[in-house]
Image (spheres, rainbow, N blue to C red):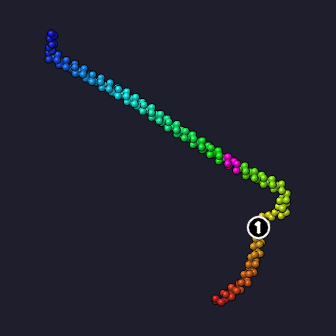
Amino acid sequence: MVRPRVYTPEQRRERHREQDRLSRARARQRERDQSRSVTEDTTEDAEQIDTAHVEAEAEQASNAQAADAQADLQRARSTRIANRDRNRAYRRRRMEARLNRATEEADPAAQAEENDAPPVPNHQQETDFLSNDDESNDEFNDESSGSNSDSSEVFDLVE
């Protein structure tokens, strides 16, 4: 049989301190290991979340770029159509003007009719207009002079 070892009180205290120190060291080590695993798990989760978030942002950005590109294409197409229509209308008006000029130049009868009546200068037109007014004013004055006698009679009656 083995005899149990007998420790002095000093040795017992020293032994207890050593066991406490080792126990605390193991506890700290466990905490570090757990925090590392949690950190690693958290880091992995965060990386996965970040990766998913970045992928989602990239997809949204590509969708937004695709939508912008589609809108740009639509705008360019509508602008092209509007310009084409405007150019066609301009060319049509030019062709009609050319056709009208060519028709007028080619139709001697229409040109002769226009040339038969001499053009009246603008200042003569105004003078004619004024002279017509003078004549109509004379007629009005003639009529009103006859009616003036009637109005004076009416006036005499009122007095």
Q: Position of residue 151 (x, y in %)?
A: 68, 85
Would you place residue 30 above or below residue 150 in this image? above
Residue under the point 77% across and 64% down: 122
Q: Nearer the viewer, residue 120 or 67?
A: 67
Quarter of the image with the C terminus in it: bottom right
Task: Identify which amino acid the numbered label 1 is placed on.
Answer: Glu
Neighbor class of circle 1 (other Cα within 10 Å; few <14, some 14-19, many 20+) is few
Total labels: the figure holds: 1
Q: Position of residue 24 (x, y in %)?
A: 25, 23
Check the image and report above or below for 150 versus 66: below
Point 17% across, 16% down: residue: 11
Relative side of 64 to 35, left or right:
right
**For residue 157, above or below residue 53:** below
Give the residues in magenta. Answer: 84-89
Q: Residue at x 83, y 56 (%)?
A: 107
Left or right, 8 with respect to 112, comes to: left
Query: Quick one: quadrant of the N terminus?
Result: top left
Q: Is mark 1 on a helix, strand or loop?
A: helix
Q: In which quarter of the image is residue 129?
A: bottom right
> Which residue lies most toward the front here?
1
Q: Name the residue under label 1.
A: 126
Q: Where does the image place residue 101, in percent across and percent down from the top left?
A: 79, 54
Asked if the magenta segment contains residue 26, the reply would be no
Q: In which quarter of the image is residue 22?
A: top left
Q: Residue 154 placed where, x, y %?
A: 67, 87
Chief SS of the magenta region: helix
Q: In this view, does 145 lie to the left or right of 67?
A: right
Q: In which quarter of the image is residue 152?
A: bottom right
